Amino acid sequence: MPDAEFSSSDVPVAPEAAAPARKRPKPGERRVQILQALATMLEQPGAERITTAALAARLDVSEAALYRHFASKAQMFEGLIEFIEQSVFTLINQIMEREPAGAEQGADTGVRQAAKTVAMLLQFAEKNPGMTRVMVGDALVFENERLQQRMNQFFDKIESTLKQSLRAAADGDGSATPSLDAQVRASMLTAFVVGRLQRFARSGFKRAPSEHLEASLARML
């Protein structure tokens, strides 16, 4: 199958939470510190549910100080989701620009787009384990329902993007039912990604989501 490698150096990593500075932080700096601390705490075993009290203690501030920057804990998780969305879809746009798909480019280009999109998602999870718990919903179980709905929409957009790439591949292959073929393959790839992320999170981040990735994609694509 076409090369599915995606440069891991392109994948953003959530900054590590620094020790809270004693001096007064600059405008917006404390907000970033709160999100960094939350992401770091999500990397720890048993961190599916994080209280604002624990988060405040990590930052050595009061809970009231947290609420001066976020109206609720749900807003903190929304900040993490925004990081995920912006990072992933920026990288997807880069993949599409580097590998423009279309019937005139042939079926291989669409397949390469899809393969690199899957590889990027799994590498993003490996580099941001705390974010993985948000992506698969483990960290959102006890939070506002709209957060899980937003992550569901995220994966719907991923599936739609994969379908677009694979539709070009189906057209290039001369499929009699290109839309259906593309939908089936996009759904399968999305389920594969979600499954790998869930296994990564529930193994305590020991089972790498990119394990045997080339061989797995070769069978599916």
Image (cartoon, grey):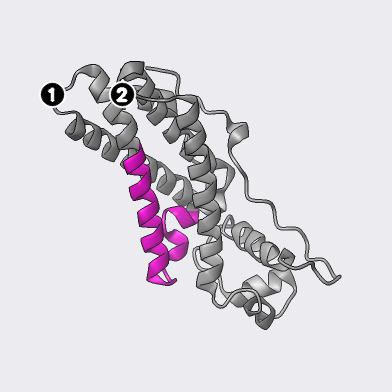
Q: Name the residue under label 2.
A: 219
Image coordinates for residue 214, horizontal then vertical, percent: 42, 24
Image coordinates for residue 112, horizontal then vertical, percent: 40, 24
Image point (36%, 47%), residue name: 157
Residue 140 belongs to the span the image colors magenta: yes
Foreground mark, 1 or 2? 1
**Nearest the eye: 213 or 44:** 213
Image coordinates for residue 58, horizontal then vertical, percent: 70, 69
Which amino acid type corresponds to the residue marked 2 in the rendered image? Arg
Q: Is residue 163 left or right of residue 39?
A: left
Q: Earlier in the sequence, mark 1 or mark 2?
A: 1
Question: Is residue 83 placed above or below 217 in the rendered structure?
Answer: below
Circle 2 sits in a helix, a strand or a loop, which is it? helix
Span colored in magenta? 133-161
Q: Name the residue under label 1.
A: 176
Asked whether residue 204 is in view, the answer is: no
| Outermost residue toward the bottom in this view | 64
Which amino acid type corresponds to the residue marked 1 in the rendered image? Ala
